[in-house]
Image (spheres, rainbow, N blue to C red):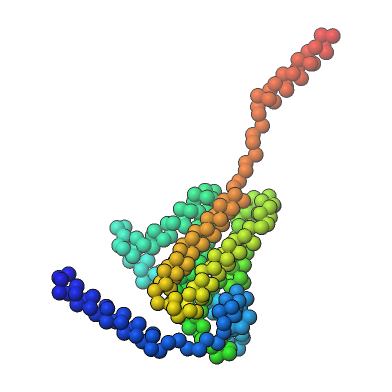
Amino acid sequence: MSKKKRTTVLVITFLILAVLVIGIATCGVGEKHETIKEAMKDAVLHEENKINFFGLAVNPSLVSAYIVTAILLVFALIIRVFFVPRFKIVPGKFQLLIEQWVGIFDGLAKTNSPHRNGALGAYIFTAGSYIFVGTLYELFGMQAVTTKGHSISLPAPLADINGAIAMGVLSYTFILIGGIAANKLKGVGLTLKEFSLPISMSFRLFGALLSGMLVTELVYYYIILSFVLPVVVGVLFTVLHALIQAYVLTMLTSVFYGEVTEVHEKKPKDKNKKNKKDNKTINNENIEVAL
């Protein structure tokens, strides 16, 4: 890029930023319908800001969950119909990205569960993708109107304790099914031994995502902080949480699944020990005959 073009781009960028700053400063922010204390309390309990969903007042996170699920399903359908038939032996950039994406979870499944990893790879791929995309979804700031007529940004699906518990229980159920398939009743015992696992997975997800949402809510509430800092906060508490939490849950699931599905074969009887026992019996009989 020549010096003249570079200067032009910088000038245009500066003018756009100046216009945005002037617009924000002159327009200000609308009157807030709740205090920061009420906003952060409702972010945890979801008692006030409900959304009308086909006649039902539901938590905003439920709407987010349906939207994220629809996005993933449509994206998967598009890839399957339009891209997979065109995959080549020498992959292009998009094919390489998809293969790396799938390969991460497939390798995780094979490493932690070498005996039964077909279904495990598919599950942790789905769960990890949902956590990652669902957490990043918060960055888009999609707006919705509450039942009281206020505008709010839709949060991440797993920022609601109900969504986090559902994910934790689903992962634990998958581990239990794997244990039953591999070791029958023994697999049930191995899984039930880790009875605190669904609680720890659920609250780990909920706590991590909720903390990021609360910090972001605090930053956006005060206009003095809402110019540059939200970019840093968004990257720090959203992108990093998306990566870390997707990895943590899939890792825990694959590790415990590998433990409960490991087949413990019975040790063969020691033939030498049996021969010694037989020889001892014969010697005792010979002694009795001699006497």
Residue furthest front in the image: 224
Say which residue appears at 51% left-offset and 71% top-offset: 215
* Residue 103 pos. (x, y %): 42, 57
User: Can residue 177 be seen here?
Assistant: no
**Up/down of 279 relative to 202, above or below:** above
Say which residue appears at 47% left-offset and 57% top-offset: 105
| Residue 250 appears left or right of 3 | right
The part of the image, by quadrant, that contains residue 229 is bottom left
Say which residue appears at 79% left-offset and 16% top-offset: 284
In the rendered image, which quarter contains the C terminus? top right
* Residue 211 pos. (x, y %): 54, 68
Looking at the image, which is closer to me, 122 or 203? 203
Residue furthest right in the image: 291
| Residue 165 appears left or right of 243 | right
User: Can residue 244 be seen here?
Assistant: yes
* Residue 289 pos. (x, y %): 82, 11
In the rendered image, which quarter contains the N terminus? bottom left
Q: How many labels does the image show?
A: 0
**Up/down of 227 relative to 248, above or below:** below
Residue furthest top in the image: 290
Say which residue appears at 38% left-offset and 85% top-offset: 25
Looking at the image, which is closer to me, 32 or 93? 32
* Residue 150 pos. (x, y %): 54, 88
Looking at the image, which is closer to me, 80 or 141? 141
Looking at the image, which is closer to me, 240 or 182? 240
| Residue 240 appears left or right of 61 | left
